[in-house]
Structures are given as structure tokens and as C-alpha cells.
Image: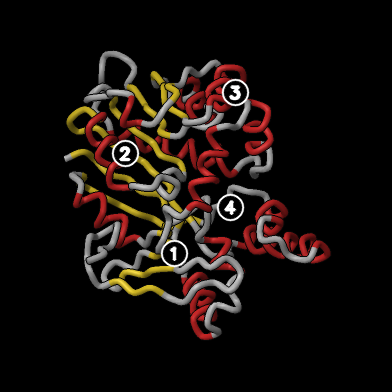
Amino acid sequence: MPVCPACAGSRIRTGPASGATGRRITACRDCGVHFWADHEAAERQEAIELQTELTAEGYSDWVDIKREQAGPDAWRDAITWIRGALPPTDGAPVIYDVGAGDGHFLSLARDEGGFAVTGNEIAKGAVELAKERYDVDLDLGVLEDLGHVEDVDAATLWCVLAHVPDGDQLIREVHTMLRPGGVLFLQTPHWTAADGAANGVKRLTGGRFSKVPDRRIAQHHWILHTRRSITAQLERLGFTDVVAEPKLRYTLTSRAYFASMNPPQWTVGPASWLLDKAVASRLAPRIVLDVRARKA
């Protein structure tokens, strides 16, 4: 019997297929998580393979369509929390960033937070870019192949959990790499009330109106957590002191976000302007969760 990938419960329900993409969204009635029912479909696997083939130039183009301050502001908050959550040590504590991208976060943790830093990426282009831009050395490969065992004090995952096919496996690997009492900080996409409303329209129309659900649950993010679901998953896998907070944080520029939905071209400018105004006024949905936890 299929079970929830977050809380491992069995009270799950799958909705209608999208008329545009054929994707079905499954929901857990116990913890509220929503996910792509067939997230190992060929469509998603092809997207993952393309990511691993990105060159440094291609990865640089991806990084450059993000909002300039959205990352650094959140990163500094995380660095401050990690520093306060760890006991004093003689040397520099070690942060490992899983899916470290171009290494910008790690460079801040090193230069402003005083941490020893490292991380990994599955794209060779990202590893090259991190060294070139920030002199950050990254492992190339998935965590399970790298052999880290109780050798880091803190682990971070910036919007990584929703990308990997097996979240439980990744969380177990992170738990293994942390020293006793080590801490985890992760950001992951959040299932909001706005998502619920859009998915309700999709259900009522038999999948004919599915633009927003198709954008929110897709090749890049196959699972959207609630506070309850991510807490249940982390506690089930050996973490304690879990705190999850919804955040108003839009990493992509509004223009890039709307363009990814393939709307009529003339609508991108006005829609982007409206979203920018909503984000600035703090009325936009809080589409990510910041999650803090400790290895039990």
C-alpha cells in the first residue's frame, strides 16, 4: 500500500490528472504534504539528467536570474542561528552545504561567520563555478557516495529536499554525517492556502485549470511540505527540536517565475509587477519553510 513520504501514514488521496501535463497530485490527510504521485516519471528523470550536465556558464546563467538579496539575507539569518545553536569549540566549526550551487552561501559562512566550509553538487559546472567565483571547494557527487560519517557540525539544504527522488535517504545521510548534537538548517517549498485554492479549482474542473499546480509541483519540486509534514519526517528519521517557519521568500525574479509558466508573453510584465508589489507589501503567500533541527 502506498504511504506518505513525510509521515509514513496511509491516508493519502490522489487528485485528477492535469489536462496540460498529465501530472497528478497526491495529498496526505494526516500531515498535509502534497506531492507528484509519479515523481519518478521519465519527464522528471530527464530534467535531473540535464541538471547534471550543466556547464559552469550554464549554471551561472541560472544563478543570475535570482533575486539579488533574497539569498544573502536568509543565509545570514541561518548562519547566526547555527553559530548560536552549536557549543563553543577551539577550532572553526564545519558547515556542509548539500547541493551548494555556486558556493555563495558557503563563502558568507566562511568570511562572515568564521566557519570551515564544504559541500557537494551533482553538476560539475557548479563545482567549477564555486571554485572560480568564491574559492569554495565542493565534492562532486551525491551524498550517499561520498562517505561522510560524523565529520561535520552543521548541515544546510537550500531547497534541495524537494529535488531528490528519495527524501528519507537524503535525510538519513545528513543525520549520519552530523556529529552528535550537530544541527540541520533547511529551506524547502511550502504548501500554502493559495496552493490549496488553486488545487481545488483543478479538482473541480477535472484538471482543465491547472497552471498554478503544474508550476508549483513539477520537475524541479516534486513535493511541497507543511510545518506538520516536515516535522514528522525529521522526527521519524532521528532529529529533535524541530522548528518549521513559513517565510515570504521568492528566490527567482518575478519575471523568471511567471515566464516559467509559459503564459501569453504580454502578461509577463504586468503579472511580474503585481507580484513584486505583493512581495514588497508582505501580502504574497509564504511559499517556503525555514526548518531548524538537531541530531538526537
The quarter holding residue 209 reads bottom right
Q: Are marks 4 and 3 in contact (CB under 8 Å)?
A: no
Neighbor class of circle 1 (other Cα within 10 Å; few <14, some 14-19, many 20+) is many
Compare marks 2 and 4 and give the one earlier in the sequence: 2
Q: Is residue 249 left or right of residue 85?
A: right
Compare marks 4 and 3 and give the one earlier in the sequence: 3
Where's residue 184, x and y in %?
A: 31, 39
Disc marking residue 184: 2
According to the image, label 3 marks what residue? 129
Q: Nearer the viewer, mark 1 or mark 3?
A: 3
Disc marking residue 191: 1
According to the image, label 4 marks what residue? 250
Coloring applied to the structure:
secondary structure
Q: CA distance from mark 4 to mark 3?
A: 23 Å
Q: Secondary structure at mark 1?
A: loop
Q: CA distance from mark 1 to mark 4?
A: 14 Å
